[in-house]
Image (cartoon, helix red, strand yellow):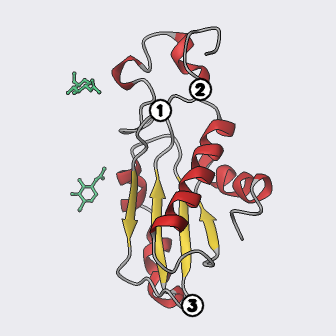
C-alpha cells in the first residue's frame, strides 16, 4: 500500500486490438503499436502502414491502448477526478504495461514464443516505440 492507500499490486483492464488474418506462425512477426494519447481504435484505423505490410511480413497486428486513454482507465471514471489518481500516468508506466502485455501475448498466442516483436508508433507513440526498444531490448527486437 502506498501513501495514497492504493495497493501496489492493483490491476486494471487494458484494451488491445488484434488482427491475425495474415499471421504466419513459422516465420511471421508481431507488429506492436505502442498506443499514444487517444482511443486505440482511432490509431488502428489510421495506421495504414501496419495493415499494408502485414501480409508480406506474415504479421499479427497488436494495437495496445495507453493507460488513461480510451477504455483503459486505471481508476475507471474516477481517473481524472483528482490529481492523486493521475500519478500513474507516465510514459514509464505505459512502457511497463506494454512489456507485460507482450509477455502475456507470447504466453497465449500459440507459436509466438520466438516471434520477433517490432514496435511501431507515431508522434508521442513513436517516442514510446523507440523507448520501448531501448528500455526493454529483451522484449522488443526493433
Ligand atoms: C474504426 O473503423 C471502424 C470500421 O470502419 C468503425 O466502425 C469505427 O467506428 C472506427 N473507430 C474509430 C474510433 O475511428
Ligand atoms: C463511466 O461513466 C459512463 C457515462 O457516465 C458510464 O456509461 C460508464 O458505465 C462508467 N464506467 C465505469 C467504469 O464506471
Q: Which mark is residue 27?
A: 3
Q: Which mark is residue 68?
A: 1
Q: Answer with left or right where residue 116 lies relative to residue 12.
A: right
Report how far apart the C-alphas of labels 1 and 3 lie in the structure. 35 Å
Nearer-the-camera pick, 87 or 103: 103
Looking at the rendered image, the quarter that the N terminus falls into is: top right
Give the residue displayed 47% in from the left and 81% down from the top.
54
Where 70 falls versus 59 (above or below)? above
Nearer-the-camera pick, 110 or 33: 110
Report how far apart the C-alphas of labels 2 and 3 lie in the structure. 37 Å
SS class, disc 2:
helix
- The residue labelled by disc 2 is 88
Where 70 falls versus 8 (above or below)? below
Q: Earlier in the sequence, mark 2 or mark 1?
A: 1
Q: Earlier in the sequence, mark 2 or mark 3?
A: 3
Q: Position of residue 40 (x, y in %)?
A: 41, 50
Quarter assignment of residue 96: top right
SS class, disc 1:
loop
Q: Answer with left or right where residue 119 lies relative to residue 70.
A: right
Give the residue displayed 43% in from the left and 55% down from the top.
43
Where 32 falls versus 35 (above or below)? below
Q: Are marks 2 and 1 in contact (CB under 8 Å)?
A: yes
Amino acid at each position: 500500500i502506498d501513501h495514497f492507500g492504493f495497493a501496489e499490486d492493483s490491476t486494471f483492464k487494458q484494451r488491445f486490438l488484434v488482427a491475425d488474418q495474415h499471421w504466419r506462425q513459422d516465420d511471421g512477426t508481431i507488429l506492436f503499436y505502442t498506443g499514444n494519447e487517444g482511443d486505440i481504435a482511432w490509431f488502428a484505423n489510421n495506421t495504414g502502414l501496419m495493415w499494408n505490410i502485414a501480409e508480406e511480413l506474415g504479421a499479427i497486428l497488436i494495437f495496445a491502448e495507453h493507460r488513461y486513454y480510451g477504455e483503459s482507465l486505471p481508476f475507471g471514471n474516477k481517473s481524472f477526478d483528482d490529481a492523486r489518481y493521475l500519478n500513474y500516468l507516465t510514459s514509464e508506466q505505459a512502457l511497463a504495461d506494454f512489456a507485460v502485455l507482450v509477455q502475456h501475448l507470447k504466453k497465449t498466442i500459440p507459436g509466438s514464443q520466438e516471434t520477433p516483436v517490432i514496435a511501431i508508433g507515431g508522434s508521442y507513440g513513436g517516442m514510446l516505440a523507440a523507448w520501448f526498444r531501448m528500455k526493454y531490448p529483451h522484449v522488443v527486437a526493433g
